[in-house]
Image (spheres, grey):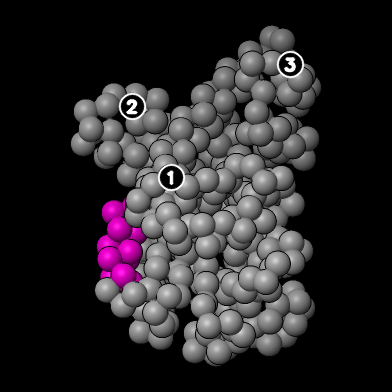
Amino acid sequence: MNIEIAIIGLGKMGLGISNRLSKKGIKVYGYDSGWNENLYKKNNINGANNLNDLISLFESSRKIIWVMVPSGKATDDTIANLNSILNDGDIVIDGGNSNYKESIKKYNLLKSNNISFLDSGTSGGVWGEKEGYCLMVGGDKEVYEICKPIFEALSADGKGYGYMGKSGSGHFVKMIHNGIEYGMMQSMAEGIEILNQKKEYNLDLTQITEIWKSGSVVRSWLLDLLNDALKENPNLDGIAPYVEDSGEGRWTIQEAIDLDVPAHSITSSLYSRFYSRNSDSFSFKVLSSLRNQFGGHNMKKSN
């Protein structure tokens, strides 16, 4: 497969994407502001010390850059810098959780210099490298077709990826995906807490979630991860019931308001995360454990 791509941001997701693409035969370059030559060598990455050096590594005239840094200022600054050093026909893919409205702005910014931009909603967390990622892509269709082999290589067995529509649509779909995720996790956490509070039965939560994994209508990857967390730590000892939110839930609720769509479960789940920061509840420990299981998010430890 005669394709080259550079990954900017080699955190848990960026490194996983880099490794999966390399294993699929795609030539990958990398840059992370926190890395040095030893880290690149340790991870078998053809790395660069800065963005200009990264661009110079390409052998082909068209450069494809995948940006996997935190949304907000880090992404803004990275894409602004790329806008000043890339050339006509080059392609930038934002694979992070950027707000779709900001992605449209970036599309227009880069387009003014004849640089293409795709917004790729990327799901799969720390498991994506092994299991494959789910990819929801927005932007110009012809640019998507150029990059399609990359999305196919990242996906799970050639499934779970696709073109959503014009600029912003990929990150919009991922935003709603994460809003749904909030609601699913909250429901699961509340149900497990009810089971946990029924002390007269002394229920084995690890056994119950293991049973639910087979044949149950609530079986899911989230349930699998919850079962894994309970196997590791049945009482979730030492985990603080403090649940962060990364922004997508808030954006989803705002979009629901703008579109006059009732979104009770998602809204309630976000407010519950706010409440977790001033509470002590087993269900919030479940939520915290789940976020760590699929996303590698750092859990706060109770004192």
What secondary structure is found at the residue carrying circle 1?
Answer: strand
Front-most of residues 302 and 72: 72
Q: What residue is pinned by disc 1?
A: 164
Which quarter of the figure is the N terminus placed in? bottom right
Dot 2 surroundings within 10 Å: few (below 14), some, or many (20 or more)? some
- Secondary element at image label 3: loop
Distance from Cα at disc 2 to Cα at disc 1? 22 Å
Please name whichever residue, 293 or 158, is drawn nearer the observer in this view of the structure: 158
In the rendered structure, are the residues bearing label 2 and label 1 in contact, judged by CB atoms less than 8 Å apart?
no
Query: How many angstroms separate mark 3 from mark 1 (CA)?
Result: 32 Å
Residue under pointer 2: 263
Q: Main secondary structure of the magenta part?
A: helix
x and y percentages locating residue 4 in the rendered image: 62, 74
Of pointers 3 and 1, the one earlier in the residue sequence: 1
The mark found on residue 215 in the picture is 3
In the image, which residues are magenta? 97-111
The residue shown at (42%, 82%) is: 86
Circle 1: residue type: Met
Q: Residue at x 46, y 33 (%)?
A: 180
Question: Residue 143: x and y, percent?
Answer: 45, 61
Q: Is residue 279 above or below residue 126?
A: above
First in residue order: circle 2 vs circle 1: 1
Q: Secondary structure at mark 2?
A: loop
Which disc number belongs to residue 258?
none
Side of 198 where 231 appears, left or right:
right
- Residue 30 placement (x, y as % from top left): 61, 77
Callout 3: 10 Å neighbours few (<14), some, many (20+)?
few
Report crowding for label 1: few under 14, some 14 to 19, many 20 or more residues within 10 A (C-alpha).
many
* Relative depth, front residue between 262 and 34: 262
